[in-house]
Image (cartoon, helix red, strand yellow):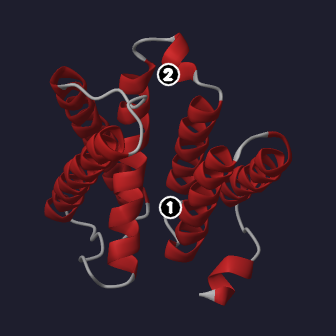
Amino acid sequence: MIADLIRRPATHAEVAADGVRAAAVLSTIVMVFWWGPVDVAVFFLALGGLTLSRYARPHPVFDAVYGCALMFACWSSVLNVYELISWWDLLVHCVCTGPVAGMAYVLASHVGVLPAAGHTRRDRVGVVLQVVLLGIALSVLWEFAEWAGDAWVTEDIYVTYADTMGDLAVATLGSLAAGIFLAALTRERQPTLHN
């Protein structure tokens, strides 16, 4: 794992993904000095996810998209954009759940829990389905956490039936898009056959 974390980037996409990681580190430092403990915790969680993604060795373009999605969600939270724009919550659920579900699939296949993506059409369909199912599962867990936070921590967390169903619906759409994107990147990596 250490070798994966300290290896040098070899492509422009890997440099971009590492640039997003560097931005996350800088953002976390900013949180420590100028924001509160909750905001620091949000960025520490993102740093954990970005560290795992470097270990999992996803396609570097997907890695960069995943990192940008995490940063987008973190800064949306810190800057309270959810309170300023009514539909922002749906946008974040759509844009972020898919890359997180895709990275969960990449990590699970990297450690052997799920089968790695193959190069056949059937394999790519399997990737899409697994990413969608992971996205739905992660969304349900998130909605449980929101409900628990509202019930036992603070009533500032907005939880209604319509909000939960909307979040689950757009998260599923985002996961479908991420699964298709990941499968397309897998196809791009296909070895060419020489006769």
Q: Which quarter of the picture shows residue 12?
A: bottom right
What is the secondary structure assignment of the residue under circle 1? loop
Task: Name the residue beneath numbered marker 1.
Answer: 59
Is the residue 97 above or below the residue 101 in the image?
above
Q: Find residue 7 and report its image quarter.
A: bottom right
| Quadrant in the picture for residue 112 | bottom left
Where is residue 152? Give x, y as percent. Answer: 33, 46
Image quarter hosting the C terminus: bottom left
Mark 1 is surrounded, within 10 Å at the Cα level, by few (under 14), some (14 to 19) or many (20 or more) other residues, namely: some
* Foreground: disc 2 or disc 1: 2
Q: Is residue 191 visible?
A: no
Residue position marked by numbered label 2 in the rendering: 82
> Where in the figure is residue 25, as x and y percent of width and height?
76, 56
Q: Nearer the viewer, residue 55 or 27?
A: 27
Relative height, residue 115 to residue 145 (above, below): below
Say which residue appears at 35% left-offset and 24% top-offset. Answer: 90
Q: Position of residue 192 (x, y in %)?
A: 39, 68
Residue nearest the viewer, comparing 128 with 171: 171
Rounded to the nearest whole Å, what is the CA distance between mark 2 and mark 1?
31 Å
- The image shows residue 135, relative to residue 147, as above or below, that is below
Q: Quadrant of the N terminus?
A: bottom right
Residue 112 horizontal side relative to residue 3, left or right: left
Amino acid type for the residue under numbered disc 2: Tyr
